[in-house]
Image (cartoon, helix red, strand yellow):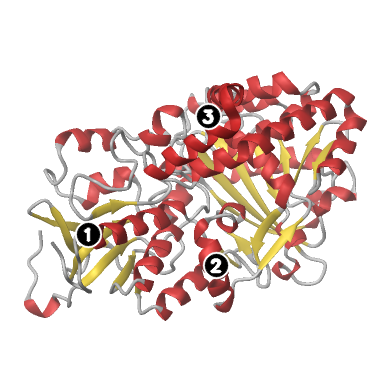
Amino acid sequence: MKGTSAATVALPYDAVVVGAGHNGLVAAVILARAGWKVVVVEANDRPGGALMSGEVTRPGYVHDLFATNLNLFVGSPFYAEFGDDLARHGLRLRTSDFPYANVFPGGKSIGVSVGLEATLERLRQLSPGDAQGWQQLNDLYQRMAGTLFGVYASPVPSYGMAKVMAGAARTLRRKGLADLAQLLSSSCRELVDTYLVSDEAKALIACWGLHLDLGPDVSGGAVFPFLEAFSDMAVGMSVAEGGASRLVDALCGLLSEYGGELRTGVAVERILVAEGRAVGVELADGERLQAARAVVANVSPTALVGSLLAPGDLPVRDTKALERYAYGPATMMIHLALSKPVPWEAGEELQRYAYVHVAPYVDDLARTYTDALAGRLPAEPLLVVGQTSSVDPTRAPGEGQVLWIQVRTLPTRIGDDPAGSLGGKSWDEAAEPFADRVMAKLERYAPGLGAVVLDRTVLSPADLERQNRNLVGGDSITGSMHLRQNFAFRPAPGMARYRTAIGDLVLVGAGTWPGPGLNAQSGYLAARDLLVRARWRGALGPGRRR
């Protein structure tokens, strides 16, 4: 470790936050509001992590580079508490009442909009059995949503979680609890096959599973797509007016208002540990920042043990558990600047939907997922087509449009291309040719799209990891969400409460419960836990520690 002179030793902070992703900023805001002296240190020149916008195609066209859907954030306890303050700092939301749709061969489509009856009417035109099954699934959602979202918002395990489950026992009773257990253990294919008739209706729900790494046949993979499909039907879909970075700017503004500090463009080299406690960090330039109360690491579990902690800082068992933390398939992002809206074969009505899923069917999703795990480039990757400027017209000038295309799921390392058309085995070589393949698929559902494309920017899995080291291998969700690495097992057994075996070192971010998405949960829950523990210690003011 580098030596540090007295001149480079800063006055002690109460908390040093490593990483300015949204959960790191959320934690910093909560601690700063409580009177703690807080600094957030970010290696990149801009804060935000996977929450960032920019004019990456041409001037005036504002794209969300990675994440875009703010529904989880808007539904979070943090937003309930700080929403008005974020608005003061410039956050404005744009919400679409047409959250998502799917397209199919032959010019077919189905859209889900706010309000059950409108969606049921579309499904009746497809199949009366689908409308009946969708109604039953919505009834199940109404019965289970309170419990499931209560679990989502609680640390695991915790008194809050136990309270949620006790309430579920009273309200759901034995039959309801059995239904809940069956839902939690089901694959998405099992869920949709139970309730829905047509391949098209089944794909409406199953596509949401591949937003994570929940292929249609993954046990326990039904819950997220089920909740996403029906919560979006209830509330629509929200984005940040003017770009996702407006949310980051608002969080940074709030942090500054509470006296917090943000340092960008400087990497943390090491978390400093003394006598079993985290006492600060050492920066790449040799400066040390002392932390009197806590170090909050908003990093991936493998980055924590692989580069930020010295050998022996953590017990061997915990080190090995975090080293085994598993990442999922990769993601590609394609950003398009268009001269006019997408010419969907299924009709202009589709242009108003926030997301359009191009799969087309559950079996295609299953093959895509299996191919990605086996290192094969899938022939039919899922395309999540975000029509951002249909939700937020400020994103593009005149009749122009921005298109946000998330390509799921892809191999981290390319082992084989069954189509045989790509020469390169690295993503740096294969990115543009594979993006051409993606565009050819999209053109089958939107003939003439190529003629309205003004510019495009492709971010390969390798680009995602270069932009944000937490996106290991281009995994946009920072770690598999399979049952063995979910709930109390995320990131590892015994570490789901954000605490580590090192005193005053907490881990937050997508690699911790409740996982990925712009949910603000881990930062919120971990910061509140730190404040509670500080009160238990009898801390009397900034800088005091037992």
Q: Amino acid at mark 3?
A: Ala
Q: Amino acid at mark 2?
A: Leu
Residue 372, label in figure: 3
Foreground of the two, 366 or 340: 366
Asked whether the residues under the numbered discs 3 and 1 touch, taking CB atoms below 8 Å apart as contact, a structural biologist would say no
Residue density around tag 1, few if under 14, some if 14–19, many if 20 or more, within 10 Å? some
Residue named by callout 1: 269
At x 56%, y 35%, the residue is 409
- On the image, the x and y values in percent for residue 58 come to 65, 68
Residue 247, label in figure: 2
Reply above or below: 416 against 78: above
- On the image, the x and y values in percent for residue 255 come to 41, 74
Foreground of the two, 52 or 33: 33
Element on which disc 2 rests: helix
Foreground of the two, 261 or 64: 261
Q: Earlier in the sequence, mark 3 or mark 2?
A: 2
In this orientation, does residue 52 appear?
no
Residue density around tag 3, few if under 14, some if 14–19, many if 20 or more, within 10 Å? many
Instruction: Answer left or right for 362 relative to 24.
Output: right
Foreground of the two, 260 or 441: 260
At x 35%, y 39%, the residue is 491
